[in-house]
Image (spheres, helix red, strand yellow):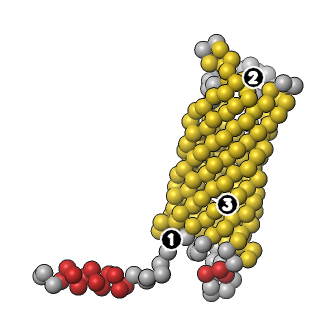
Amino acid sequence: MRLFAPLLLLALALATPAHAQHAQDIGLTYTQSRSNFVTAPGSATQYFYLRGAAADYNYTLWNGIGISASAVGLTGENFGGHVDIHQASFLAGPRYTWNLGHILPYEWGRKGGIFGQGQAGYIHATSGQYPTAGIQANSASGLTWAAGGGINLNVYHHFDLRLIEADFVHTQLPNGFNNSQSAVRLAIGINFHTQD
């Protein structure tokens, strides 16, 4: 019995390929977000747009299931003739990637992948108007979460085009009403992957 445990461990070690690695993805995207101004009930909804960039990292743990982290910076200027908005958010959460298959039977010959993810984190906004307890502040912080997904299409070896990424984003920043904002965020860009 004492010999059985070491033999089992040795068999497992030999059965696991020495070169096995977990896939990693690094994405860089141009990002645009659409949200609505807080308005009185019954009035027409007005939208504003923020533009910027995002970087994300995904580490695949097993069978397409991984952990992702994102940093997003967005900005908009001269809303209502005098308000600027700058936002930075940092999120993390699970991601699932479905591999589209291979053109060639090599690691770099994959066609791409479709991913879906859910993330939660922190947002910090500056240069805006954030009313809190009757005081108008020009910066604020709060919780945020996002859910969505995207499509990566391989173009050369380890490089993909991120054809589209779409996320529904919810933030909790002071707005003098319900301290709740919802937005739709779209992005395109590039993605680098280490392996399948």
Q: Residue at x 63, y 28 (%)?
A: 140
- The quarter of the picture where residue 35 lies is top right
Residue 39, disc? 2
Neighbor class of circle 2 (other Cα within 10 Å; few <14, some 14-19, many 20+) is: few
Q: Which residue is mark 1?
A: 22
Q: Nearer the viewer, residue 140 or 114?
A: 140
Q: What residue type is disc 3 on?
A: Gly
Q: What residue type is disc 2 on?
A: Thr
Q: Nearer the viewer, mark 3 or mark 2?
A: 3
Q: Is residue 186 visible to us here? A: no
Q: Which residue is mark 3?
A: 27
Q: Residue at x 70, y 31 (%)?
A: 126
Q: Residue at x 63, y 42 (%)?
A: 89
Neighbor class of circle 3 (other Cα within 10 Å; few <14, some 14-19, many 20+) is: many
Q: CA distance from mark 1 to mark 3?
A: 17 Å
Residue 42 coordinates in the image, percent (x, y): 76, 21
Placement of the C terminus among the 4 image quadrants: bottom right
The vertical placement of 128 against 19, above or below, is: above
Q: What residue type is disc 1 on?
A: His
- SS at mark 1 in the image: loop
- SS at mark 2 in the image: loop
Q: Residue furthest top?
A: 134
Query: In the rendered view, does 3 fall on the left or right side of 158?
Result: left
Residue 181, disc? none
Q: Nearer the viewer, mark 2 or mark 1?
A: 1
- SS at mark 3 in the image: strand
Q: Earlier in the sequence, mark 3 or mark 2?
A: 3
Q: Is residue 173 visible to us here? A: yes
Q: Residue at x 69, y 38 (%)?
A: 87
Q: CA distance from mark 2 to mark 1?
A: 48 Å
Residue 27 coordinates in the image, percent (x, y): 67, 60
Placement of the N terminus among the 4 image quadrants: bottom left
